[in-house]
Every structure is written in C-alpha cells, then in structure tokens.
Amino acid sequence: HTTSLDTMSGEDRLGLGAGATNATETSTTSSDYKAVIYMNLNGGVDSYNMLVPQTCPGTQDSYRSSINLTLDEQYYDIRGPIAMPRDVLNQISPGNPDQPCTSFGIHPQLSTLHSLYEDGDALFV
C-alpha cells in the first residue's frame, strides 16, 4: 500500500555537484546513477495482457486440480477470448533458470518497455 505522498529529500539526484544546475556545469562525464521507478497507472490496465507467459515447460499446480496444464496453457485457458495472441507479442527471455517459464511476451503497444528490457535497463518484479 502506498500513500501517494511525495517528500523532497534535498539530495542531488542528478549527481551534478553542489551549485550545478545542468549537466554541462559539472566536470563529471559519466555517472553510475541508477534509479528504481515505480509506475502507478491509474485506470484500466490489464496486467495479465502486459506480460504474458509464453513457453513454460512442465505442468504446474493448476487452478483446476483435475487437470495439469503448463502456466502458458493456464493463461490461455483462463483468459479465453481476451488472451493476447502469441503472434503479436514481443518475446523476451527471463534469463533465470529458477523461473518456470523460459519466455514471456510483452504487449505490442509496450515496445519501449520491450526495448528497455532487452537493453537491460528495465525488469519485471
């Protein structure tokens, strides 16, 4: 749960040094600055259609105990007609052997997020 309250820390978040107002006023040519950006999207975002399981070998505990389905099969079974078609998704690999899926798909209208992920500048938590 978040409060949506913003507080100013007074810290130099750009790493420009005291008194500098833009990047040209500092002697530093590069920065190791990293940030965690949390996006709170107000409105109707269907997160199940933003990041879609694609290749998930092996069956997992199913939402229906009477059948064994892989996670991607569960997604398409549950979502039915509102599931994202596999052929329109931007494919990514999680690169984590502990992940139950070896590939996911990102919604085609999130191409910038796909590029950021592929460049190692974004991740899904």
Image: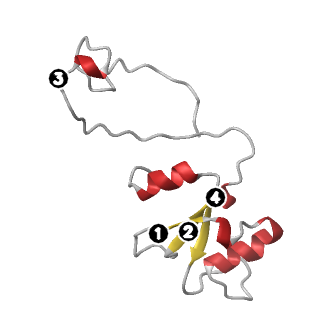
The kind of secondary structure element at disc 3 is: loop
The residue at the point 26 percent across, 14 percent down is 20
Residue for badge 3: 27
Badge 3 amino acid = Ser
**Residue at 32% across / 21% down in the picture?**
11
Image coloring type: secondary structure
Q: Earlier in the sequence, mark 2 or mark 3?
A: 3
Q: How far, Cα to Cα, is label 4 from label 1? A: 14 Å
Residue 64 falls left or right of residue 8: right
Figure quadrant of the N terminus: top right
Q: Position of residue 118 (x, y in %)?
A: 43, 58
Of helix, strand and loop, which one carries label 4? loop
Q: Kindly identify which residue carries mark 4.
A: 107
- How busy is the neighbourhood of tag 2: few (under 14 within 10 Å), some, or many (20 plus)? many
Q: Secondary structure at mark 1?
A: loop
10 Å crowding of disc 4: few (<14), some (14-19), many (20+): many
Packing grade of label 3 (10 A; few <14, some 14-19, many >=20) is few
Mark before the other along the chain sequence, 3 or 1:
3
How many labels were placed on the picture?
4
Q: Residue furthest right?
A: 81
Distance Cα–Cα, label 3 vs label 1:
39 Å
Query: What residue do we see at 53% from left, 49% from top?
Result: 112
Tell me the residue that label 2 is attached to.
104
Horizontally, is 56 left or right of 28 in the view?
Answer: right
Tag 3–tag 1 contact (CB < 8 Å): no
Which percent across, then down, holds residue 43? 73, 40
In this rendering, the answer to whether 58 lies above or below 95 is below
Disc 2 versus disc 3: nearer the observer: 3
